[in-house]
Amino acid sequence: MEKIIINGGVPLNGEIEVSGMKNSAVAVIFACLLTEEKVTLTNVPDIIDVDVSLDILRHMGCEVSRPAAHTVEIDAAGLRGGAAPHELTVKMRASYYLLGAELGRFGHAKVGMPGGCNFGVRPIDQHIKAFESLGATVTESDTTVEATAMRGLKGGSIFFDVVTVGGTMNAMIAACCATGDTVIENAAREPHIVDLANFLNTCGANIRGAGTDTIKIRGAAKLHGCSYAIIPDMIEAGTYMIAAAATGGKLRITNVIPKHLESITAKLEEMGVDVTEEDEAVVVSACERLNNINLKTLPYPGYPTDMQPQICVLMCLASGESRLVEGVWDNRYRYVEELKRMGADITVNGRIATVTGGKPLHPARVRAVDLRAGAAMVIAALAVKGKTEIEDIRYIERGYDNIVGKLRGVGGRIQKIVEEDIF
């Protein structure tokens, strides 16, 4: 079993380049199934979720190659509908984009239930509502979801009961080749939704309003191939921003879109951290004393739920009592028990966590209970003196491209080893 070992207590200083956005890349990869022509994607992160997505495409008859670092070529001319292996789709949440892609391409889709991190109940009822609004009939079993539109998808009106990122993206994928016009209301506004829309439009789709709560789509008869660059990952950037503050260092984080980071920047500045924006970079300088804050996670442009565990670590290092409210998922505090192993004083009551900061943290053996919780463990380990062992690092590698190498490049004493090599 692989582990990450960190000898912390050393400030991070230097420059880190952010990779392409995980949440955008996996959606765009599955959206490539809508065209029979070759697509070339650049700035693709080298992460497990991308590897699994490409393996799924290969099993479905697509030709997939990686001619250069962070570049992927996909030719879906030989796509076989319904051929996605269940043992692969269950490994990741984003496999549900196969439903929208197969429906858009064939008018029929059959996909195993998606997997991913456990944040409590994560239904796909809004995805199903969208497909039904486009004329599909959807049936579910314990292991699969099947959707059929015998006469093809028809444009329709979709109103989401709750803001859903995955549902919005799946509806866009399905609707861009439907006959007629589609209007999606109460749509999510995250940057990766805009990125997916830009990709689809580059392939010949007609999507307007992405990034607002109303998206309008005019169905296209056929999409064509293209070359497209994935946007930078705002969550990876935010993770390194907090790592700089937690370790008392200074990092210049490049290949970012500063506007996407505004909610993260605002909270760091409220805690006393100095953040300077450049055109495609941010510079984060730690402060002598971190302030306590109150924070609630919200859909974009609010503070992202995917940055909640990371900033909780910073709250542990701050003076005084901080209050954290999870406004998106029911069960995102499973990592708290791991931080408590390191001496954190955190009380959880439902969706509210009260963090009493300023108490010294110490090294411990911990595990990554999910992707972003794993990033929080890395930050905590970097911030405290001594050796911390992090297990279950496969979760971290699902979404962070070369996190060990990047942190070593800015002074982090971090290595990935197999268990039998531990001294």
Image: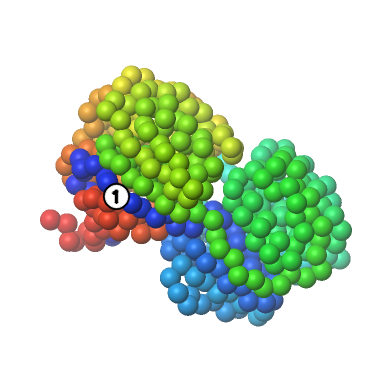
Image: 353 above or below 143: above
User: Where residue 77 sits: x, y (%)?
Assistant: 67, 79
Give the image's coloring scheme. rainbow
Residue at the front extreme, as displayed: 279
Q: Nearest the camera: 318 or 359?
A: 318
What residue lies at 80% left-to-right and 65% top-to-bottom? 220
What residue lies at 59% left-to-right and 48% top-to-bottom? 191
Q: Nearest the camera: 351 or 303?
A: 303
Q: Quadrant of the C terminus?
A: bottom left
Identify the image quadrant of residue 33.
bottom right
What residue lies at 60% left-to-right and 59% top-to-bottom? 27
For the image, the number of numbered tags is 1
Q: Is residue 16 visible?
A: yes
User: Where residue 172 sits: x, y (%)?
Assistant: 71, 55
User: Where residue 7 sits: x, y (%)?
Assistant: 19, 47
Q: Is residue 239 left or right of residue 125?
A: left
What residue lies at 32% left-to-right and 56% top-to-bottom? 406
Q: Amino acid at mark 1?
A: Gly
Q: Is residue 375 left or right of residue 101?
A: left
Could you tell me which secondary element the residue under label 1 belongs to?
A: strand
Q: Is residue 4 left or right of residue 324?
A: left
Identify the image quadrant of residue 137.
bottom right
Q: Is residue 111 visible?
A: no
Identify the image quadrant of residue 292.
top left
Q: Nearest the camera: 349 or 237?
A: 237
Q: Callout 1: 10 Å neighbours few (<14), some, many (20+)?
A: some
Residue at the top extreme, as displayed: 320
Q: Which residue is mark 1?
A: 14
Image: 149 above or below 264: below
Q: Quadrant of the N terminus?
A: bottom left
User: Where residue 213 sits: x, y (%)?
Assistant: 71, 40
